Image (tube, rainbow, N blue to C red):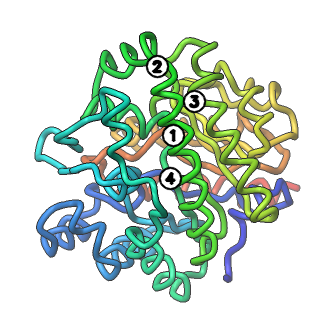
Amino acid sequence: MVNNRFLQALRRQPVDSTPLWMMRQAGRYLPEYRELRQKARDFLDFCHQPALCVEAMLQPLRRFDLDAAILFSDILVIPHAMGMNLAFKEGEGPVFSSPIRTADDLKALKTDTLTPHLSYVFETLDRVKPLLQVPLLGFAGSPWTLATYMIEGRSSKLFRSIKTLLYQKPQVVEELLALLSTHLMDYLSHQIQAGADAVMIFDSWGGILTTPDYHRFSLKPMQRMVQGLKKRHPHTPIILFTKGGGQWLEAMANTGADALSLDWITDLAQARQRVGHRVALQGNLDPLILYGSPDTIRSHSRRILEAYGEETGHIFNLGHGIDPHTPPENVTIMIDTVREYCRNKRMAA
């Protein structure tokens, strides 16, 4: 690869400019992606076509000066491969027609190896790798996040179904989490073998838990994944992200992950003081700042860079995925601001 900044920052090595990529950087905010999306019946069909996924991954790299490519897929391909009937419905998002509610439902899942059912993901990585001049990032959802979808059956605000099961029959939830952590570890390991230079674990719903429950049901399975992956791939960086998890940064850093990704609620300067040099930090611009004026976007982008300071180990990113209605020209303003800030720092040094 020509541009190695992203991996250097993950390893807390010196870089010539703060690396930058965006969560959901391939997606609906790009008109070229919306046109490409018409070539598939639905989103799940799109994910099953490596040629379309490769093109979706390349689109933002052609348009923007980015330092990493991220696999185009979805976290829910894992429960789908386990035999759960998944559909992406317009206006509703992902829906499982038969969610898990009992121990018998859990037993009905396919628990043999899932990799043959996910070959399209590994083919996507294999195809895109020779086309890239930047590092390739793989990803998976966390066991807890996948469990929430599998038990709720869809997105939720209250998470009533999974919390009811959690507080009535925690052993069922823990059995599901153990099963998922094993399969997710294998899934990410195969992504690395297919060409991923680093991997990221997305814990979208860990922040809904109490502190004791977060440690037991969200962090513990992720730590098992991190430790297992480090045994298999000791030199591959791992990024951990818990949305709403800023109060648990120290515990997250103790998992053995190489970097923590921060949502926009967490103060970056304070986060750096709390975790020191144990991990790199990624983030953490509020995605909706990209609806602001050019001056607002510039000032908030510079504020993120100033908050981290002079040391190595920062990857500029959003605090969550880019919103589908974001004007692409505002993304350019953000990226140009980061590049200009780093260039001026180099010249002043």
| Residue 270 falls left or right of residue 290 | right
Tell me the SS state at disc 1: helix
| Residue located beneath label 1 in the image | 143
| Residue 40 falls left or right of residue 243 | left
Identify the mark nearer the N-term, 2 or 1: 1
Q: Residue at x 58, y 16 (%)?
A: 213
Q: Quadrant of residue 232?
A: bottom right
In the image, residue 199 sits, relative to residue 222, either above or below, namely below
Give whichever of 338, 227 is nearer the camera.
227
Residue 192's x, y, as percent? Answer: 63, 70
Residue 186's x, y, as percent? Answer: 58, 60
Identify the mark nearer the N-term, 3 or 4: 4
In the image, residue 121 sits, relative to residue 223, either above or below, namely below
In the image, residue 230 sits, relative to residue 321, either above or below, namely below
Identify the mark nearer the N-term, 2 or 3: 2
| Residue 66 falls left or right of residue 329 | right
Which three-letter amino acid code belongs to the residue tagged 3?
Ser
For the residues labelled 3 and 4, the Cα–Cα distance comes to 14 Å
| Residue located beneath label 3 in the image | 218
Tell me the SS state at disc 2: helix
| Residue 205 falls left or right of residue 35 | right
- Residue 140: mark: 4
Judge whether residue 213 can be spotted in this image. yes
Which three-letter amino acid code belongs to the residue tagged 4?
Ala
| Residue located beneath label 2 in the image | 208
Question: Could you tell me if the residues under marks 1 and 4 are in contact, i.e. CB atoms within 8 Å?
Answer: no
**Disc 1 residue crowd, few under 14, some 14–19, many 20+, Cα 10 Å:** many
Question: Could you tell me if the residues under marks 3 and 1 are in contact, i.e. CB atoms within 8 Å?
Answer: yes
Identify the mark nearer the N-term, 3 or 1: 1
Q: Residue at x 66, y 59 (%)?
A: 19
Judge whether residue 16 can be spotted in this image. no
